Amino acid sequence: MTWVIGIDVGGSKIALGLVSPDDQILSRRRIDTDADEGVDVVTARISTQVDSLKRDLPPGETIAGVGVGAPGLLDPVSGDLYMLVNLPGISNTPFRAILQEKLRLPVRLDHDAKVAALGEFHFGAGRERDSMVYIVVGTGVGAAIIYQGNLIYGESNSAGESGHMTVDPNGRLCHCGSRGCLETYAGGPALAKQYALASGVTVSGAEVTRRAAAGDAAALLVLREAGRALGIAIASIAMTLNIELFVIGGGVASAGDLFLDPARESLKDYCFESVAAKIKVTASALGEDAALLGAAFLAR
Amino acid sequence: MTWVIGIDVGGSKIALGLVSPDDQILSRRRIDTDADEGVDVVTARISTQVDSLKRDLPPGETIAGVGVGAPGLLDPVSGDLYMLVNLPGISNTPFRAILQEKLRLPVRLDHDAKVAALGEFHFGAGRERDSMVYIVVGTGVGAAIIYQGNLIYGESNSAGESGHMTVDPNGRLCHCGSRGCLETYAGGPALAKQYALASGVTVSGAEVTRRAAAGDAAALLVLREAGRALGIAIASIAMTLNIELFVIGGGVASAGDLFLDPARESLKDYCFESVAAKIKVTASALGEDAALLGAAFLAR
């Protein structure tokens, strides 16, 4: 087994971790990104931090490879990045090829939700399981399905857009142009908007989850509605695929049972009793480390 | 390659086909069943028809095996049948073992939707494809998902209950106890019920599809609503799995584009444009033969 580096590209920061042969994150770095940075600047900054991590290696050890998880549209086979929401300068670039050349190391790239799912599956809430659905509920809502040990990519690499499953055909308009998408109920901006409507106070989605934890009634109601929408989507996925473990990550999931209990409840309302009885809905065990460990797994 | 027999167990009849090494149905038999028949009577009647089919074999040829598709709850590994809606006497029996002993031939058993999906995938609308979702819309609504050539069974053998995906969380009550299931919009009894509400006339679901084909306005409206519900479910499956071929079988699908065009239309309303653009929704190419040919495939 070998030492690898896992990289988690986020909306406003990039996290890097040096991962040991026994899958421990032994050293970390963080880059705060600016939206106007281009691919050359960002990959150069990553390269600097990779060099810095290398100095934390035990004597005589080397890095065998680098794994990267990134949000947006990308092709895991070619390594091209088509669209990265908060880093437009990286969009439409052969990201993996450029990074690979700068690092002089093999690089593998995949969607952030799939990478985090790999982390949870191999080292977190999905250990000892055969199949798992990972749903990340943050600003956006995405999913990754692992069936019998393998990620499902779909025919055009766009599986996992479960944030745009319809949970109410007459529901809220979504930025995707559709109506009633899960994301319009459970995503961070949806929490912020519904909280503002309920309380007259405008705060971020993250603040809504904090206020719910502190007992704020309006925040609790908003989280409950979000959780119930998640439960409907889980029920529909479960009825179709009969996968029995759902691991929920992302910022909104940090609300824990305030968010997950309503999901478990509505899951029962919208699913065969015999199917629902076997389903476990649980929060991510690794939190933000899921992506780093999953990226490291990808690199091996 | 070898000669096999495919058997399609339905609600009120059992169809049998003698299938040649090049996957042609060369001879057929049909058994009309009574609801009060037990497993010994039904398997004895099947055995008689299998003997009859054997006499149609070319000289010197033998049957290598038998495949059976059946509706209801069953375990494809053990071959036990737990619940068969219109043949309660067969419920909770080791159906495959009993049939195998009577026939003195290897028997394989699987769900009717999965068996029909195998037929369409290998010999019908799914030939040359890698992945496919088959949805059967009849009295009940079920599905079978083939991903990269393999049927998805799920962790407890209950994948494919997509008839109970939620298409409207505030929608119609379903016999399963849930609300807004696809089946409450698209299944035959739903067509009959909605047509009775719209026209004051009580007819079967099959008659509603016939009347729609004849231009009956109320029947067309009912089929349109059914098709739109199907499109919502297809959109949600497509967003999660990114499978691009949906083959629709069963009695309601015999209405063809009167049912499928509204599905294609609402699919576009509830799905990313880029995803919807690649999706093909098509009627079963083999009709009732899908199950016979799929059962024969299973037997090989």
Image (cartoon, coloured by chain):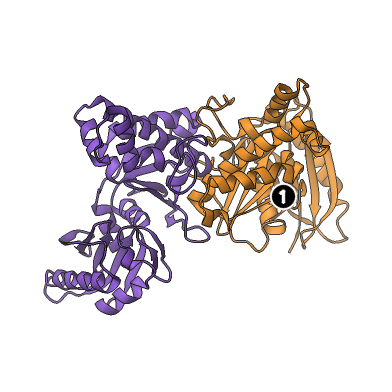
Chain colours: A purple, B orange
Q: Foreground residue, A285 or B179? A: B179
Image-based side of A277 in relation to B193, left or right? left
Type of amino acid at the residue the image marks with label 1: Ser
Horizontal and vertical percent for residue A268? Answer: 44, 29
Residue placed under numbered mark 1 in the picture: B284
| Residue A18 appearing in the image | yes
Horizontal and vertical percent for residue B162? Answer: 57, 40
Horizontal and vertical percent for residue A262? Answer: 36, 30
Q: Foreground residue, A54 or B281? A: B281
- Would you call the spot at circle 1 few (<14 residues within 10 Å), some (14-19), or many (20 or more)? many
Image-based side of B6 in relation to A134, left or right? right
Image-based side of B113 in relation to A267, left or right? right
| Residue B78 appearing in the image | no
Residue depicted at x 42% and y 55%: A149
Residue sitting at the far top: B200
Image-based side of B176 in relation to A99, left or right? right
Location of residue A112 by image quarter: bottom left
> Image quadrant for the C terminus of chain A?
bottom left
Letter of the chain that mark 1 sits on in the rendering:
B
Location of residue A183 by image quarter: top left
Q: Foreground residue, B132 or B26? A: B132
> Image quadrant for the N terminus of chain A?
bottom left
Residue sitting at the far front: A200
- Secondary structure category for the residue under label 1: loop
Residue depicted at x 26% and y 65%: A36
Residue depicted at x 44% and y 39%: A234
